[in-house]
Amino acid sequence: MRIFLVFIFSFFFFSSNAQNTDIDWLQAINVHRNQSLDPSFKLITNSASAVSMLCPISVYGVGFIAKDSTLMRKGIYVAGTMAISATLTYALKYSINRKRPFEAYDFIDKQSKGGGPSFPSGHTSNAFATATAMTFAFPKWYVAVPAFSWAGAVGYSRMHLGVHYPSDVLVGAAVGAGSAWLGHWLNKRLFQSRAKR
């Protein structure tokens, strides 16, 4: 949590230089992009909500059918992570209220839906919350590698499609991963205290 707060403070402290770097990077990614990849990145960006909802439902559902309380708990943990991530993301979005890049710069080519404030990226926080929570729940390389590859692709797609700055995506990733870590810590504390009783 301290690292996250230092990151946010640093972001605002260096905001004048950061804004120039942000738009330079976004211009390189969006304006000079390979447009033939647009359909693929639209598919990836649209997968964020579906995959994030499907993961906890599937884990809990399999646990319920198999009468496996550990698996059911993991499903609840992943769902709880999504709730923490969404709450933090929307609190930041509406307290900072940053304009979308295509609203501020007419040369940005918007290729996807992008409603509401820009900072941080909700799609990215969602994806990284899912990837990190699934990795905590199932700590295997064959879960972590595809999960984080997908989450990284979701984050990149938001810049490729012109709806988020790089800093929106970086902070979205930090919020999502941090939410999973917080959920994991709370989950451990909750079950440790129950075990003691």
Image: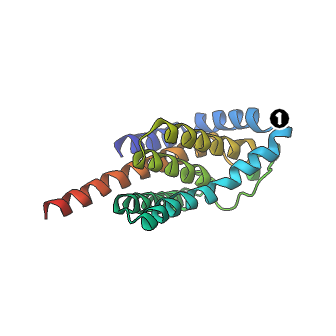
In the depicted view, which residue is nearer to us: 75 or 14? 75
Q: Give the percent coordinates (x, y) of residue 13.
A: 48, 39
User: Residue at the spot x=66%, y=40% of the render?
Assistant: 156
Tag 1 residue? 34
User: Residue at the spot x=36%, y=46% of the render?
Assistant: 1
Q: Is residue 87 visible?
A: no
In the image, residue 161 above or below residue 79: above
The crowd level at tag 1 (other Cα within 10 Å; few <14, some 14-19, many 20+) is few
Q: Seen in the image, is 82 located left or right of residue 38?
A: left
Q: Give the percent coordinates (x, y) of residue 68.
A: 37, 62
Give the residue type at disc 1: Asn
- In this view, the residue farthest toward the right is 36
Q: Give the percent coordinates (x, y) of residue 60.
A: 46, 63
User: Residue at the spot x=79%, y=50% of the render?
Assistant: 110
Total tally of numbered discs in the picture: 1
- In this view, the residue farthest toward the left is 197
In the image, residue 1 above or below residue 97: above
User: Residue at the spot x=41%, y=49% of the render?
Assistant: 137
Q: Seen in the image, is 25 located left or right of residue 131?
A: right
For residue 190, what is the image quadrant?
Answer: bottom left
Q: Secondary structure at mark 1?
A: loop
In the depicted view, which residue is nearer to us: 7 or 39? 39
Q: Is residue 184 visible?
A: yes
Q: Seen in the image, is 115 located left or right of residue 3?
A: right
Q: Give the percent coordinates (x, y) of residue 66.
A: 42, 63
